[in-house]
Image (spheres, rainbow, N blue to C red):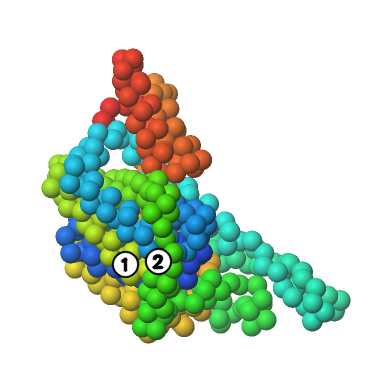
Amino acid sequence: MSALDVSLLTIPDTIAFALLIGVSPTVGLVTTVVMMLVGAMGGQPGIISGSTAAVAVTVGAAVSSMGMRVLLPLVVMSGVIQVLAGLVGVHKLVAYIPRPVVSGFLIGLGVLMALAQLAHFKEMKAKHDGGSEETEEHFGGGEGDVEWLSAKTIGMGLTLIDATTIFLQVRTGWKVVPPSIMATIIITAIVYLLVPKSVRENRIRTVGNFGTVSLSPDKVVNVVKQAYSGLKTVSKEDLLKLLPYALSIAAAGLIESLLTVREIDEKLHLKGSNVGSLKRETFVQGLANISVGLLGGQGGCALVGQTMVNIDNGGSNRRVVVICGLLIAAIMLLGGPLISMVPAPALIASIGFIVYKTIDWKALGEFNPSKKETWVVMSTAIVSILTHNLAAGTGAGVVINAVFQAVGGGEAKVNS
């Protein structure tokens, strides 16, 4: 059941990050399935990998600047850099990232994911017979018609119901059906059984509104063909321009992946992240990105929120990760049309559940005015992540922590 839960939680994120870059949802789905299957071959047991915000933001910037033709070499380059990082021992540095920076990283990542969901509540434009456009808040609200609630209001209401369902299940500890699946079933039933068809079609977005959702062979072949079609136009100068993007992707991906390994160790009360497991994870993430790139994917890394959900559900082994990847492929191959009908609010609240699992609430709840250095370090990491990126936020937090320790007044020590 954990594999099914994580699969349904991962699909909306995958689609959202593909659209963020400007590629087909199929590209994102290929990325997630390959990342999971390759990651399960030798990475940390229980880690869920796939398309992530950390990688998508930088890939999107590169594609926007240089075109889709650079997607394949960019992702492959980032994978090669990660493999080289494993060879020179970069993974060992994760042990020196202080706990306040880790907390800031998790909080910043959670906030980024939450902010990305706000776009779903924007009102869509509706065209009338005369060709004029009007926001959906007034659509169908002419004289003599019933003026329904706006799409924004309906979406927020359904999302609130969904989130409440998840919260109650988490609080009561009822695990017969995972919270996200139960909430999705309830919201889908409400929308299709209780909401009038005219309101449903004009006010409520579904997964299908965000693009074609499919992993059919012809769609996958088209993704691969498209990736290679522009490859011959990529010059040596283009590769040099791509290098800073590739370094940023590799760094952000490894930071998120290796910190996820640390979080698993703490969650399972292990003594500490084994250097060998960190090295394997570094190599596997690199090999996964190389594989993804050669298949036309968009690159990715470990998914902190989904991994925590998987661990909480008892899925701390590679078998669950493999099943999860195969389930996503099967769902998209056989049930793409059904997934397309799921109301967006159901999945938005499910992503909210991932945000809840990602954020380090313990750190936020342990505010101590006497430990101002810890809060300065954590806040620096959060602000830098929100204004720049995950790699920059982690680096800034580490630097500020080092400054405090150098002057002798810092309390934000490594692993504290």
- Residue 278, given in percent of the width and then of the height, sits at 19, 47
Give the CA distance from mark 2 to mark 1.
11 Å
- Is label 1 in a helix, a strand or a loop? helix
Q: Nearer the viewer, residue 187 or 403?
A: 403
Relative to 302, 349 lies left or right: right
Mark 2 lies on residue: 231
Q: Name the residue located 38 percent from the left edge and 57 percent from the top edge.
A: 74
Q: Position of residue 111 (x, y in %)?
A: 47, 47
SS at circle 2: helix
Q: Residues within 10 Å of mark 1 (few under 14, many from 20)?
A: some
The front one of 234 and 393 is 234
Total residue callouts: 2
Q: Are marks 2 and 1 in contact (CB under 8 Å)?
A: no
- Write down the residue under mark 1: 294
Q: Amino acid at mark 2?
A: Leu
Residue at (65, 72) in percent of width and height: 203
